[in-house]
Image (cartoon, grey):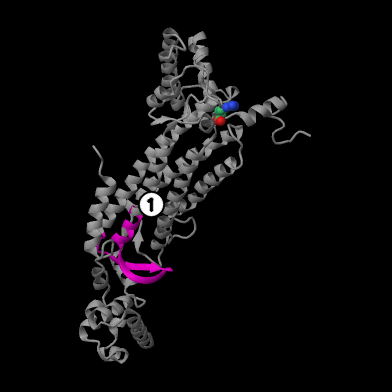
Amino acid sequence: MTSKIWGGRFSEGPAAIMEAINVSVDFDQRLAKQDVRGSRAHCAMLVATGIISEADGLAIQEGLTRIEKDVALGAFNFKRALEDVHMNIESKLAELIGAPAGRLHTARSRNDQVATDFRMWVRAAIETLDEELAKVQSALIDKAEAFADAIMPGFTHLQAAQPVTLGHHLLAYVEMFGRDRGRLTDARVRLNECPLGAGAIAGTSFPIDRHMTAEKLGFDRPMANSMDAVSDRDFALEFLSAAAILATHMSRLAEEMVFWSSAQFSFIRFTDAFSTGSSMMPQKRNPDAAELVRGKTGRVFGNLFGLLTVMKGLPLTYSKDMQEDKEAAFAAFDTLELCLAATAGLVADMKPDREKMHKAAAVGFITATDFADWLVQKLNIPFREAHHITGRVVKLAEGSGCDIGQLSLADMQQAEPRITDDVFNILTVEASAASRTSFGGTAPDQVRKQVVSARERFLKRSA
Ligand code: ARG
């Protein structure tokens, strides 16, 4: 029985179904620029090696120039009947220049062609993401500099742990995004080998020059094994893995922005540009952009798991399953570009409230560690014992419903008689944060140094 849903569309029978499942030009037209570039290099090599004549080479290059222009203008008319981007461009070339077009595919297969195009596309995608990541880092560093001394509670287990500065907290993300850039750049190094010339699977009997095409296309070298060249997509998986980790990092910052901006926290506020209202509750200012950055992480994971699943257990070499590789990478790239722009915008837009953050930091015996450290440093008490004494002091404070710093000296001396007055100097949140001057610590002076170092490491353009 014909399905009511697609029965009408597929009235022509199996052939139409075949086209519908086989066609990839709807999405792989995104490779058109790379495909033309690859063909240009291949053609130049065929001429240089004497495999095709100079006259045919010239005609092909001229035709490709016209195609390139149409592609750039978005004026190229892709036809679904021609299946994929490669066949579309080759047929157009034949339309434009006639017989010489038929020589372009000498010593080449769509298998090495698509692997080459896709590698070039992922390489460019990595370069774009690297630039977008630098913009996010730049926004974070600027904000960190402005709030290098803004005290807030630092959390472990989402319980107030020790006072930190907002600058320090934001710089943590600068480091994470720095490693994301590193992962992408590492993937780029490994992917930058050229599959072109592998043919369908086994190489070719024509005297091609794979080093020449590799160099023309900006690859470091030709891939060493033709079977590997046409059959692996690990470069796309590496890209997607790095993308998934990056999305995870963005989702954590987004989540913090969501609760920091809630009325209960009120650590930050977004301007109207990044807030949305509720259709029912007039008091609401919803952080939709941050929520969506958090939520879109799921898509990127899906892209990674989808392609891993496609590739799992595939025998060498090319199988049509692998046509499913491209949409995952395209979708992850689009999602990340959008989320990175939103994240940079959110960071620049957020208005931290120093007072609210400070107030939230000055609760929950947050300077208890400072108290213990003081006992160690001033009274030479072993840390383990200092921990116990501090526990008793916290218990006393808890019993009297106050913070440690609000106890009297006499109260404290019940726990340890050698305690002196100057312990009170270290029990403020400012003193606590300012004392953490170790490398990478939260003291405002450290944070300012880290700001300089982060700019140096991440934002300096090599000329
Ligand atoms: N559209 C194909 C893909 O994306 C191109 C390679 C086709 N190769 C083949 N032997 N049918 O994988």
Residue 214 appears at what percent x and percent y? 41, 26
Q: Which residues are magenta?
A: 147-174
Residue in view at x 37 percent, y 38 percent:
127
The N terminus lies in which quarter of the figure? top right
Answer left or right for 325 relative to 398.
right
Residue 72 appears at what percent x and percent y? 41, 24
In terms of depth relative to the viewer, which is nearer, 372 or 163?
372
Residue 436 appears at what percent x and percent y? 26, 68
Q: Secondary structure at mark 1?
A: helix
The answer to which quarter of the image holds residue 153 is bottom left
Residue extending farthest right: 1
In terms of depth relative to the viewer, which is nearer, 86 or 135?
86
Question: What amino acid type is highlighted by mark number 1?
Answer: Phe
Quadrant containing ligand 1: top right
Answer left or right for 380 relative to 401.
left
Residue in view at x 42 percent, y 53 percent:
249
Q: Is residue 183 above or below residue 122?
A: below
Q: Is residue 358 above or below residue 125?
A: below
Answer left or right for 14 relative to 92.
right
Q: Based on the picture, tell me whether residue 160 belongs to the magenta stretch.
A: yes
In terms of depth relative to the viewer, which is nearer, 157 or 112?
112
The residue that disc 1 covers is 274
